[in-house]
Image (cartoon, rainbow, N blue to C red):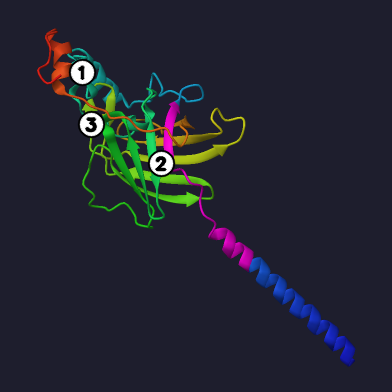
């Protein structure tokens, strides 16, 4: 092979090497691209939101238990909200009442503040798993990760609940997928689609999957204060309409 031929082949190899390097750098840069910023106050949107099934796929045992509890159910005394107690997950995110959600986003953690009952959820993004010995709570233990532009949140370690139709066993696991939607087709320019999947083999015969939507509340939109007292709900239960001293 002539010297000119060797020179041309060497130039081609160098060009290919540089191209591969550029492609690798692009791939690495894309993998480090910042996820969308979900920070802000979001209002529930009812138009596109799917309601929880009116006839959930309860197991036979749970269905029988619910039927039995309805015989003695008191709408004032046996409702968690009327006792100023938070519903917990998944009811905390399934409600369609006009209570906003504030998201505070950091690199290693997302904090979700629900105006309803002032419930606070922390979603850890530092790569940890849900601890096997996590203490069960109403809101559970949540970890998350980014899949492209979608925030995926997994929640477990939920405290059991057996009140009326609001059922939750220790086996419940919840997966939420939050995707930012932007464009003129969105009511306020930005919306948040939540796809939630609820699995609880001790309560349901099959998983339940729903879509819920939030609309962005603008930078000046602020959360309000949620204030609840058992005395207020006690008025409903007793029929006592006298003025509460602290009001």
* Residue underneath mark 3: 161
The relative height of residue 228 versus residue 157 in the rendered view (above or below) is above
Place residue 230 in its image quadrant: top left
Which residue is label 1 attached to? Answer: 69
Q: Which mark is residue 38?
A: none
Q: At numbered mark 3, what does the secondary structure look like: helix, strand or loop?
A: strand
- Number of other residues with Cα within 10 Å of mark 1, as a class: few under 14, some 14 to 19, many 20 or more: some
Sort mark 3 into few (<14), some (14-19) or many (20+) by Cα contacts within 10 Å.
some
Q: Residue furthest left?
A: 245
What residue lies at 36% left-to-right and 27% top-to-bottom? 99
Position above or below: 179 against 79: below
Verify whether residue 36 appears in magenta: yes
Residue 81: image location, x then y, percent: 24, 23
Identify the residue under disc 2: 175
Quadrant assignment for the N terminus: bottom right
The foreground one among 85 and 203 is 85
Q: Is residue 87 left or right of residue 46?
A: left
Which region of the structure is painted magenta?
25-44
Of residue 68 and residue 225, the one placed in the foreground of this image is: 225
Residue 136, percent from left and from top: 22, 43
Q: Position of residue 198 (x, y in %)?
A: 38, 35
**Residue at image location 49% in from the left, 35% down from the top:** 192
- The part of the image, by quadrant, that contains residue 40 is top left
Residue in the image at 22% along x and 28% along y: 162
Image quadrant containing the C terminus: top left
């Amino acid at each position: 092979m002539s010297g000119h031929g060797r020179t041309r082949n060497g130039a081609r190899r160098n060009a290919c090497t540089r191209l591969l390097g550029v492609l690798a750098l692009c791939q690495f840069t894309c993998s480090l691209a910042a996820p969308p910023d979900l920070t802000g106050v979001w209002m529930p949107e009812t138009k596109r939101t799917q309601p929880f099934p009116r006839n959930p796929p309860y197991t036979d045992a749970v269905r029988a238990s619910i039927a039995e509890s309805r015989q003695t159910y008191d709408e004032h005394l046996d409702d968690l909200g009327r006792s100023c107690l938070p519903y917990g997950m998944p009811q905390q995110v399934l409600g369609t009442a006009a209570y906003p959600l504030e998201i505070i986003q950091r690199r290693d953690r997302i904090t979700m503040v629900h105006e309803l009952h002032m419930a606070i959820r922390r979603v850890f993004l530092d790569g940890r798993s849900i601890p096997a010995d996590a203490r069960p709570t109403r809101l559970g233990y949540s970890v998350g990760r980014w899949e492209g532009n979608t925030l995926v949140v997994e929640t477990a370690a939920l405290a059991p609940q057996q009140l009326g139709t609001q059922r939750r066993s220790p086996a419940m696991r919840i997966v939420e997928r939050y995707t930012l939607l932007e464009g003129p087709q969105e009511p306020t320019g930005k919306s948040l689609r939540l796809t939630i999947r609820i699995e609880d083999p001790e309560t349901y015969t099959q998983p339940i999957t729903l879509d819920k939507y939030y609309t962005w509340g603008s930078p000046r939109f602020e959360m309000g204060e949620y204030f609840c007292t058992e005395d207020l709900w006690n008025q409903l239960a007793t029929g006592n309409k006298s003025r509460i001293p602290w009001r």
